[in-house]
Amino acid sequence: MGRITEDLIRRNAEHNECVIFSLEELSLHQQEIEKLEHIDKWCRELKILYLQNNLIGKIENVSKLKKLEYLNLALNNIEKIENLEGCEGLTKLDLTVNFIGELSSIKTLQHNIHLKEIFLMGNPCADFEGYRPFVVATLQQLKWLDGKEIERSERIQALQNFPVIERQIREQEKAYCLRRAKDKKEAQRKLQEEQESREKKSRPGFDGRWYTDIAATLPSSVESKDHPQAPERQEGEYTKKKLDDCEDDLEFWNKPSLFTPESRLETLRHIEKQREDQEKLRGKKKKVKLPRTLITEDGKALNVNEAKLDFSLKDDEKRNQIILDLAVYSQGEQLPPDPGVTALDGRLCLLSGMCLHREAKPVQGRWYQGSCCRGWRAANKAEAGGGSPQA
């Protein structure tokens, strides 16, 4: 669920140096906002407010925006026009593609004397017989309706036929409200069934099978950290989970559904669940890092550059030496003069694991360059029988 927060407003107030109290224009479109809140307290100077393509179900908490001139609430879940009387400077209102079925609620806009233009196309009320004449006669301050200019003759005719048109509108409103009540009831029933189905699936043994091997049926979350799953098993579980999610996703999108506020919210919840599942799967997909083998079973030491340090090996034939030039981290400056050379079972490990059969005598000297410390170590060719280091 998206919410209007101070941080969200500041992030969308860069054009005003992130100062919100003096904002005159604010755009919060496509933020999955479900409730209109806080704006009338934090942004009293607003003149233009964009809130299109969200999930706002009610017009509220904007009555203190006295200077507001343009309010865009297109593509939301609004079912009734209300709480705009306090917006004294309102000149343009966009309510395109909402769920407004109570057309008579536009009477609340009669006190907005500066309102010149309104958009109601794409709402259920726009399909009512007599819709346009009713709006034209009710809001006599209007100049434009749904992008079309209101002619003087059109208004005179609408006022003359208003009693008959008003009666027709009320009958259609009543029929719509009955259908809408049925839709709400059906949506609640489906939601309850889905919740029960999810609860049933979350119970152990919901698939009707008998489990005799308890360890095999334990979820991965309760497995011992000392005995992680094998990479092959993890990959198999990840693939199976992904296929199951794809099937559920196809079933959801292929399921017939009415275009209602509830269906829009259901779609949002489904998308949010998909995001959460994908994040969980990405976390589970991380392969277990197998322990690095440094010494083989027969006792042979392997040369492994565990730290991934830059190095080079030079063959000095004149001196019969192999010279290792190794760059270590800046912390190496704090190491003793002979870093990394330690005795191990009659052999030597040199820093990253280069193993020598006899003690390697260090070349006297090392220098410092930038944040790296470079050093030299030399060994006779006869001593370097362990082979070259592996990256």
Image (cartoon, helix red, strand yellow):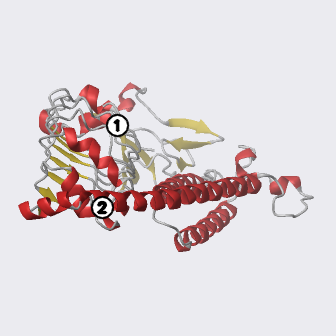
Real-space Cα distance between discs 2 and 1? 32 Å
Pointer 2 or 1: first along the chain: 1
Q: Nearer the viewer, residue 309 or 153?
A: 153
What's the amino acid at mark 1? Glu
Q: Nearer the viewer, mark 2 or mark 1?
A: 2
Amino acid, disc 2? Val
Work out whether residue 305 or residue 53 is closer to the camera in this orientation and state it. Answer: 53
Q: Secondary structure at mark 2?
A: helix
Against 184, is 58 above or below?
A: above
Query: Residue 100, image x and y in percent?
Result: 37, 55
Q: For mark 1, does the 10 Å Cα neighbourhood hold few (<14), some (14 to 19), or many (20 or more) residues?
A: some
Q: Are marks 2 and 1 in contact (CB under 8 Å)?
A: no
> Pointer 2: what residue?
164
For residue 60, the mark is 1
Within 10 Å of the Cα at label 2, are there few (<14), some (14-19), or many (20+) other Cα atoms? few
Instruction: Tell me the residue at 27%/54% (across/down).
Output: 95
Give the percent coordinates (x, y) of residue 67. 14, 33
Q: Which residue is depicted at the point 38% across and 30% down?
A: 331
Residue at 69% x, 57% y: name it.
Answer: 193
Residue 202 marker? none
Q: Is residue 143 visible?
A: yes
Quadrant of the rendering where the N terminus is positioned: top left
Q: On the image, which quarter does residue 336 sit in?
A: top left
